[in-house]
Amino acid sequence: MMPYTQYLPHRSVKKWALSDMNSRFTTAIEAGKVVDELRRQLKTINYNSDLHKLLRNIDKQVARLSSAEVVARQSHKPRLVEEPIKKLQESIDYFEKLILIAKLSQ
């Protein structure tokens, strides 16, 4: 006799959502809003060219995520966006820590 779980459908209801509940964004549009908030926080501290350069790189990662979302929708492979989202989340976490350090060192 087969277990009950083998009779359940294999597709999830939320096809494009990641299972990680700690993430603040799942799409490039939401990630862009997070980056805008980071830009506002960056304006409150003294000018640091390295932080501005890192923020531009995060903007580029958001653009890559957007193009990966388009490819994933066209090819019906939602797993293609998991890696760019993961990298972008790591970059944003690192950048937030750098902003905190810069605020504390003022």
Image (tube, rainbow, N blue to C red):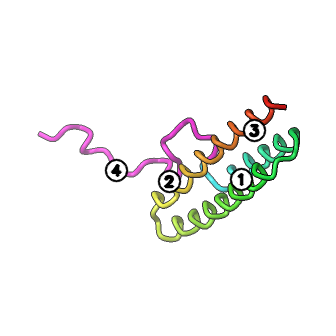
Q: Is residue 22 part of the magenta span, yes or no? A: yes
Residues tagged 3 and 4 counted as in contact (Cβ below 8 A): no
Distance, label 4 to label 1, CA atoms, is: 40 Å
**Residue 31 drawn at (x, y percent):** 68, 50
Q: Earlier in the sequence, mark 3 or mark 4?
A: 4
Q: Badge 4: how crowded within 10 Å, few (<14), some, or many (20+)?
A: few
The quadrant in which residue 61 appears is bottom right
Q: Earlier in the sequence, mark 3 or mark 2?
A: 2
- The residue depicted at 79 percent of the width and 49 percent of the height is 36
Q: Say which residue label 3 marks.
A: 99
Distance, label 2 to label 1, CA atoms, is: 22 Å
Q: Amino acid at mark 2?
A: Glu
Mark 2 or 4: the one toward you: 2
Describe the element under mark 1 as helix, strand or loop: helix
- Extreme residue in the top direction: 104
Distance, label 3 to label 2, CA atoms, is: 26 Å
The quadrant in which residue 46 appears is top right
Residue placed most toward the observer, 38 or 81: 38
**Residue 69 drawn at (x, y percent):** 57, 62
Q: Say which residue label 1 marks.
A: 54
Mark 2 or 1: the one toward you: 1
Indicate which disc residue 10 carries: 4
Residue placed most toward the observer, 56 or 51: 51
Mark 4 or 1: the one toward you: 1
Q: Say which residue label 2 marks.
A: 82
